[in-house]
Image: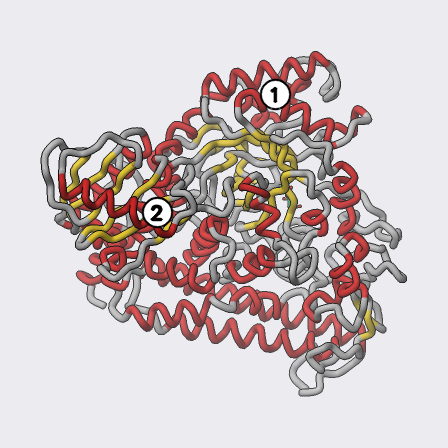
Amino acid sequence: MNAEESVHLEQLMFVDDPMETNEPRVHAAWLPPEAFRSLGARRVLVHGDGLLVDTVLHEVARACARYGGRVWHSPSWDVDVDLVFALRGADELPSSAVRAALSAGESALAEIGDGGSLGDEGFLLARDGDVTVVLADAPAGLLYGLFHVVRLCAAAFDSERPPERHRPALRRRMLDHWDNVAVHPVMGQVERGYAGGSIFWRDGRPCGDLARIREYGRLLAASGVNAISVNNVNVARTEALLLTDRLGDVAEIADVLRPYHIRVHLSVTFAAPVVLGGLSTADPLDEGVRAWWAATTRTVYDRIPDFGGYVVKADSEGQPGPFTYGRDHADGANMLAEALAPLGGVVHWRAFVYNHHQDWRDRSTDRARAAYDHFAPLDGRFRTNVVVQVKFGPVDFQTREPVSPVIAAMPATRVAVELQVTQEYTGQQRHVCHLGPWWSEVLRFAPWGPDGRAVADVAAGESGAGGGLVAVANVGDDLFWTGHPLAQANLYTFGRLAWDPRRDPTAVLDEWITLTFPPSATADPDLVRRTLHEIMDDSWRTYERYTAPLGVGFMVNPGDHYGPGVDGYEYTRWGTYHFADRDGVGVDRTRASGTGFTGQYPPYWAEVYESLETCPDELLLFFHHVPYGHVLHSGSTVIQHIYDTHFAGVEEVTAMRRRWRTLNGMIDPAVYERVAERLDEQVRCATEWRDQINTYFYRKSGVPDERGRDIY
Ligand code: GCV
């Protein structure tokens, strides 16, 4: 590629029309200007009013200015158009062509709809002759319809395209930022952040780059996310102040995200009445405490009328909570819910509660049991605006875990499922690890057995009343947003699966590839698409192959959780053990002889997991302690499986790197270089994992590799 071509590619991939002067250039992720080419070349009419309609108008105008199209806002004269965005219920337009298009949209909706309602966020896309019509009941639907048109590119204008109606399966699609306002002495600016600093905060103050936050909101809206919490669930002194003295900083973020239909939530400390209010107690049953929360919450809503609510980590890993006062989680959550209810807010109360001062000598305490033991007995006691937010697995966002039994244990509670987009345990955005297939497995898992409802159905709830889907964000002030440019796909995929958890993750990835590497701006689009799929589709399983085997989890270095540390947590207080000895490995969580964790599942899975015969290979060591010679369903022994997968994993990573190199000169050089750099690190680190795991188990078991490969 010559220098001129390189400059051209860069212009296509970066945001090159800064909203303010001196704005640093930032990678455009899945909204490069080029993705708007098809839309921007059309004659577009936007009909309706309101903040979000203005956003649609602004987006269309920007695209049209670039690609030669035209845009009208509710004109009072007749216009010929290719595309109409219209709010149902907005005043009639004098234009006969537009009236005809709108009425064709209504007929299409009557044909495919169930009573014609599109809901708060849904939209219809239909064709009427040469015109594409997007209809919505509410402005948010038009915004999502706009990004749908962008995703479809030319296909949105295909005359054969049948009408489609879209509505999100989950009402709340939320990202939690673990961003600290003040730099934490150990965790830094962003806890478990691998993409530089925070886009919201820097060194104790707002970071001040509102253009960047707006750009972020735009990306999130295009993926389907509609809620965000802006500070870490571990709330320290400075962060606590966001609720009161520094509420203005939160309001500023809310103002910037509002045009993209994103509601702001805040993580609060349970001890706020004491640390902020000067009260002597934070007892949730104390009248003074309740009054303090009610008054404080009213002030929040005075300032941020569409405030989403609170996120709370209580009695967990050192955070204060109701236990101090002899109260339980329902007492604590309900008190906050009571303050939020009249104002339309919710409290996301996290179920990540366990004993982090465990004695490793004690074999009876099992961290996996903890969330269920604490929360299942409280089912039915939470107010309707409490959402119990449950990590998808019973331990902690591992590369492989069973689905948390809590998800099936609280039918009378609104449950949100929490995923982790930030790659704390999955390569920290130095490794390619596309998590879509993993999340999809989790969301499709049927906790009551194969014919029952799925995890996604629980999160959706009856008539949309569920708690939704939440994920810990992976974004920072990095040029590429996520450190590893390919980790952008995880953020995008989260939003898309939260909108529709049944979508095929490979199709979502394909969508991301088309947007991020627009074919019209790519020298060999087929090669780029194929190569990215080859690298990313199976990358989560590749990561699993070279890290902790068969669902046993952890084996990471304590503290930073990066790289192999097989015994790193084995004798610690954190409750994450593998119990390897010279005969075998794994955690006995059976009812028959272990911790009884299998009994927390509904009968179907309780039986499947309990039995060595039926327990799936990939979770074997999560549920059972077995000898190294135990034969898996695959036909391999546990020890040989460990060796084989670890050798295979490194070979796959080496192949990823080889494949990536074929893209040199085909894509934006900055993206190319950043990924190439990270793949070098992935090969190094995977090799380290392979050699440490293989050597550890060879030394423990004394069983040689059947194929005589190098083990140390
Ligand atoms: C925000 C894990 C992480 C912690 C995180 C915690 C949580 O333990 O390592 O950094 O704390 O999960 O989800 O609250």
Camera-side residue of 692 and 609: 609
The yes-or-no answer for disc 1 within 8 Å of ligand 1 is no
Residue 107, x across and y down, in percent: 29, 47
- Residue 27 visible (yes or no): no
* Of the two numbered discs 1 and 2 in the rendering, the one whose residue sits closer to the viewer: 2
- Residue under label 2, please give it: 110
Residue 218, x across and y down, in percent: 36, 41
Write down the quadrant of residue 696 in the picture.
Answer: bottom right
Question: How many numbered tags mark residues here?
Answer: 2
Residue 669, x across and y down, in percent: 31, 61
Q: What is the distance, in whole Å, between disc 1 and disc 2 at their CAs?
A: 42 Å
Dot 1 or dot 2: first in sequence order is 2
In the rendered image of this protein, does residue 691 appear above or below residue 203? below
**Identity of the amino acid at label 2?**
Ala
What's the residue at 67%, 53% (across, down)?
393
Question: In the picture, which quadrant includes the C terminus?
Answer: bottom right
- Residue under label 1, please give it: 339
Q: Which mark is residue 31?
A: none
In the rendered image of this protein, does residue 264 appear above or below residue 488? above
Q: Residues within 10 Å of mark 2 (few under 14, many from 20)?
A: few
Q: Residues within 10 Å of mark 1 (few under 14, many from 20)?
A: many
